[in-house]
Amino acid sequence: MIRYLIKNNIKLMLRSGTNILLFVITPIILIAVLSSAFTDLMAHYEEDTGITVGYEIDGDSMTEELMDAIKEGADKEDFDLKEYKGADPKETLKKDDLDAFIVFEDGSYTVYRSDENKEQGKIAEYTIGKIYDRMASSMLPGEPKSELLTVEHPDFMPAVDSVDYYGIIEIVYFGWCAIICGAGLFASEKKNKITRKFKVSNLSELQIYLSRYIPIVLVVFLGTNLAALISIPLFGVHWGNIAISMVVITFSVAAASALGLMVYSIFENMAATVVVVFVMVWGCGFFGGSFETYMFAAHSQSVKILSPIYHANRALVELSCIGKSDYISSSILYDIAIILVCSFIGICAGAIRRRGGKA
């Protein structure tokens, strides 16, 4: 019986071609618009890899002796060192758009970082510090000379193309609007009073839920993957590891479908469901990087990680950039938690409504 319902519901959803086309055409349009609009911004992020650091030697004879070696090490790390004399570090940072300013004193140094270029400032402080410490230690007897310029780099977000970024995250975002695909199915149930027939059937609430849930997941998955496939030859979007990317998208669509069905089970009104789901998805997308890139967003990391869309976006974008991501597992686990919780609430809401005698 449930197999027949699933098959029939898929057919009903496929008849609502307009809703399904939204998952194919709308992301493609937004990818074209946003990737074009933010090309310059993302290009700056990708190409501006050099770090400019100002420095001043304040009566430090040891640093003067080491400066040539420090500059050589900085050049290898793509740092541009500019010497200043009698400059105010804070004013110079803003005036000359420096990433950091270092004042070398007697056997020590002070680092001033720019508030506007925090990441570059942190990298500059770390790297120059390592170079300085190695150079200073080279003056001690017995220090191996071959290790003087060994520098470790802290992690930072890899460069990403605007087409790749928006070509990926818009697919994820529209996948979270999965419940729209069920509009035709729910309208048919209302029109033919299917919910009343469910009351007198032997179907459990779980079976009724799955007869709706599985078709929505399948149809939305096909729509989002079709949009993703179209984006490859049309815009040249790089998806990285396609198999893992499809797994991440599958769980994302499954979680979105469970969320939408939960809301519909509570309200049993499509208009109310669309409004509530849109508000929730828009909020998650806003903090998850669907509009402003999560690399440039000013929101704190503790806020971003609350959004399931952020985890999916981060996993897929990093797969595209570097072929791996620490957010794959967190994205899938987050989605599984949403599927379980939302499905449980949706089934309970349907059971309560059924016992209450409401069709």
Image: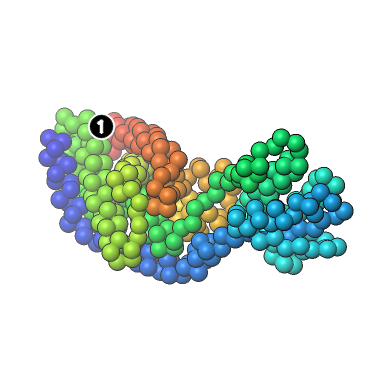
Closest to the observer, 284 or 65: 65
Which residue sits at x=50%, y=69%? 40
Left or right: residue 221 versus residue 38 is: left
Left or right: residue 106 versus residue 159 is: right
In the picture shown, does residue 300 fall above or below 82? above
The x, y position of residue 318, in whole percent, is 43, 49
Q: Quadrant of the N terminus?
A: top left
Which residue sits at x=66%, y=61%? 80
Q: Give the residue type at disc 1.
A: Leu
Left or right: residue 88 versus residue 32 is: right
In the picture shown, does residue 332 fall above or below 61? above
Q: Is residue 277 visible?
A: no
Q: Is residue 50 visible?
A: yes
Closest to the observer, 154 or 224: 154
Mark 1 crowd level (few <14, some 14–19, many ≥20, 10 Å Cα): some
The x, y position of residue 280, in whole percent, is 45, 49
Q: How is the image coloured?
A: rainbow
Total residue callouts:
1
Q: Quadrant of the C terminus?
A: top left
Closest to the observer, 326 or 276: 326
The x, y position of residue 346, in whole percent, is 34, 36
**Residue under pointer 1:** 206
The x, y position of residue 196, in whole percent, is 20, 39
Which residue sits at x=22%, y=33%? 207
The secondary element bearing badge 1 is classed as: helix
Which residue sits at x=25%, y=32%? 206
